[in-house]
Amino acid sequence: MAMALPRLSSSVNKPIRSVFNGGSIYYMTSLPNEAVYEEEKSRVTWPKRLNAPLGVVDPEIADIIELEKARQWKGLELIPSANFTSVSVMQAVGSIMTNTNSEGYPGARYYGGNEYIDMAESLCQKRALEAFQLDPAKWGVNVQSLSGSPANFQVYTALLKPHERIMALDLPHGGHLSHGYQTDTKKISAVSIFFETMPYRLNESTGYIDYDQLEKSATLFRPKLIVAGASAYARLYDYARIRKVCDKQKAILLADMAHICGMVAAGVIPSPFEYADIVTTTTHKSLRGPRGAMIFFRKGVKEVNKQGKEVLYDYEDKINQAVFPGLQGGLHNHTIAGLAVALKQATTPEYKAYQEQVLSNCSKFAETLIKKGYELVSGGTENHLVLVNLKNKGIDGSRVEKVLESVHIASNKNTVPGDVSAMVPGGIRMGTPALTTRGFVEEDFVKVAEYFDAAVTVALKIKAETTGTKLKDFLATMQSSPHLQSEIAKLRHEVEEYAKQFPTIGFEKETMKYKTNVGMLLPHICFDHQ
């Protein structure tokens, strides 16, 4: 990398050259024909071997992938941050775009041979702004960030000095680690090491963010930046209210829409862009793209000062410098290509219908759980997830998560207000994006709620028969009791038979290696979940 760094432009407004020939895009993903090697001049043997398929080169990894296919086909994926991305996105991510070394930005690279990489990144930026209906004169976007936590840290380092102050939603109240979580005795997130952080919280009686207390705390703490974003909050953010707090404190408003960006793109929930200075997001959750991240930033005129002179936003260069060369080197061109595909998909009518179904499914899921006697934090949902407080059932999220996993339902334990342990929290977090991608509708989530309720009932039976108090004691009872194992097997069979009715995403079930008894195929792979 050259020592002298020129201005790193995001180049989103640069023209994109066509890569089309005769109206059809070149398709270059097929493997070379065996006969080609007989005609090509080669003094070595490895080119032919490098083009061999995965099943020949590494049957062990190929087999694990086949097992994962079976899990995805036969299971119910309820983790809110999970989704099933499309074949076209995976083709781009698995393409030769991974081969090219790149540093810098379109038109300002530190390597040659990047003309097509420039085209792909510029197209991705253009589509990102279009997907969220943003004016390129007022917004820019960096698509190089590798994931959500690095993206947030890049924003902090770009716009804040060391030890300047950040406020964000507390982790036990639905926040995210990358927003600076720390305990009384330990700085958990690296963000809390380099910056001073203070949480705002929910009103525990309502389950909603306590905006009045947030404003009071901000008046005392005087943060330089406030984060509006969550990982386990089932309600919509009041961005206008936080904007007022930020204006009063002269603070930057960072909206982290990682969980909800697909719904924002589809226009089915309010957008943070009207109020935020910076917007970050991951790209694999509700957006349904590859695993990456984006950083959106305001540009152009910020205000007119008392002298009548225009004051411009200065975020673009600072954020681009923070991403590269500040915290990253070479970018993941294959991911950017896949993201461009996902962003194109996000502008279609079908995508909006999908996101509307995500919300409708979650509403029905919440309604059914409440009817079955479950307590939801905030009393319901306005987005893609529900947070179930299990304390009134007499059991915790860790134990229920294990039983759900044993019957092929993927969820995750989660803290709820009042918890003191993140390892044995009182809640379970579940969401609807992944199963909606597979074609689930409202009536299917009524059935999913029934399976969840049945799993909780089994968990309570296991707890009643367990003498010890630790999670390992609970698991030992679950695994050693024949009648409990029989009950688990029966429920697992019901779950699998229901899940198998729906389409697989990213692969054809007809080509799967494992279609029966996948749970019996894993004795040689033992992971300690305790």
Image (cartoon, rainbow, N blue to C red):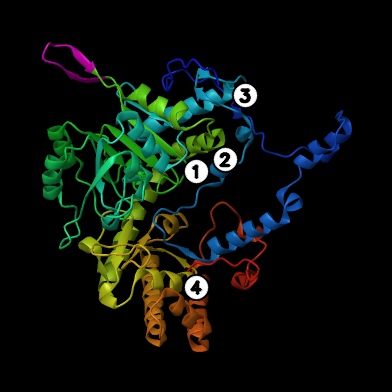
Residue 290: which numbered mark, if any?
1
- Marks 1/4: CA distance? 28 Å
Q: Is residue 196 part of the magenta span, yes or no?
A: no
Find residue 455 and report its horizontal and vertical position in percent: 41, 76
Please report the residue visible at 61 percent of the width from the left and 19 percent of the height from the top.
Answer: 112
Residue 529 position (above or below residue 464): above
Badge 1 amino acid: Pro
Residue 8: which numbered mark, if any?
none
- Marks 1/3: CA distance? 27 Å
Q: Nearer the viewer, mark 3 or mark 4?
A: 4
The first of marks 1 and 2 along the sequence is 2
- 248 vs 522, left or right, is left
Find residue 14 and report its horizontal and vertical position in percent: 45, 18
SS for callout 4: helix
Do the residues under discs 1 and 2 have CB atoms within 8 angstroms? yes
Q: How dense is the environment of label 3, judged by Cα within 10 Å: few (below 14), some, or many (20 and up)?
A: few
Residue 332 position (above or below residue 512): above
- Marks 2/3: CA distance? 22 Å
The first of marks 1 and 4 along the sequence is 1
- 161 vs 148, left or right, is left
Quadrant for residue 322, please give it.
top left
The first of marks 2 and 3 along the sequence is 3
Highlighted magenta segment, given as a residue range: 301-311
Badge 4 amino acid: Ser
- Marks 3/4: CA distance? 51 Å
The first of marks 3 and 4 along the sequence is 3
SS for callout 2: helix
